[in-house]
Image: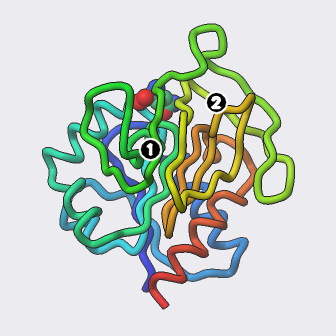
Amino acid sequence: MTTIGILDLQGDVSEHLEITKRTLDKMGVEARVSKVKTASEVAECDGIIISGGESTVIGKLMKETGVLDVIIKQNIPVMGTCAGMVLLSKESDYEQPLLGLIDIKVRRNGFGRQRASFEDEIEIFGGNYKGVFIRAPYALEAGEGVDVLAKLDDKIVAVAYKHHIATAFHPELTDDTKIHEYFIKEVLKCVE
Ligand code: GLN
């Protein structure tokens, strides 16, 4: 059965677990969803979700546990939100372990102190969407082949590349399941 793992090293993991289950129900897709911590648990997954949290901490643990290498080696589809977006990037303005799966250059905590936490309406997949931003990064530039899905004030806040998707905002903190639906469809394409 298709298995989606929510990487449980640090961050708002339970919220992702809950919305992923809800999205699968809504789509009528039968798949297993569980929290995963170790490289061997990750190796069993068809898709991995990396939550918001502290990307420096999550990245360090991913490296130490071998999770980082397994995701890269097995080419597992990844959805990364906030800290997860930083971890998916090729380049961050901070020295930290990265997956480097999406050719974007990110600025951590990019919206600055005054906009440390905010909600804003963005446009994504042809519709309006409530973006929840918490010490969010943004991408300064996106390389060739990277699909820029959403921008806020000219800052890139959502991208897709191959079967990966990264958002600077937190879809797990809203009721809107469209970002998770997109990712689940990408995972299903890869297992078919
Ligand atoms: N600023 C955090 C980081 O770079 C991300 C914040 C979040 O995930 N809410 O790791």
Who's the residue at 42% across and 75% down the image? 3
Give amino acid for label 1: Gly
Q: Position of residue 178 (x, y in %)?
A: 72, 60
151 sits left or right of 4 in the view: right
Q: Which residue is mark 2?
A: 133
Instruction: Judge from the rendering whether residue 23 lies leftward or rightward of residue 119; answer left or right.
Output: left
Few, some or many residues within 10 Å of mark 2 (<14, 14–19, 20+):
many
Q: Residues within 10 Å of mark 1 (few under 14, many from 20)?
A: many
Front residue (pair 104, 82): 104
Residue 156 vertical position relative to residue 136 in the rendered view, above or below = below
Checking the image for residue 72, the label placed there is none
Q: Position of residue 71 (x, y in %)?
A: 29, 63
**Image quadrant where one finds the N terminus:** bottom left
**Could you tell me the amino acid type at mark 2?**
Phe
Disc on res. 84: 1
How many numbered marks appear?
2
Residue most extreme to the right:
127
**Residue shown at the point (19%, 67%) measured from the top left:** 40
Q: Name above or below for residue 182 compared with residue 169.
A: below
Q: Residue at x 63, y 40 (%)?
A: 157
Query: From what the image shows, is residue 52 above or below residue 128?
Result: above
Looking at the picture, how far across and down is residue 177, in whole percent?
A: 71, 58
Dot 1: element: helix
Q: Residue furthest front?
A: 144
Q: Residue at x 34, y 50 (%)?
A: 100
- Quadrant in the picture for residue 102: bottom left
Q: Earlier in the sequence, mark 2 or mark 1?
A: 1
Q: Secondary structure at mark 2?
A: strand
Q: Is mark 1 within 8 Å of ligand 1?
A: yes
Give the quarter of the image for residue 136: top right
Inter-mark Cα distance, 2 to 1: 13 Å
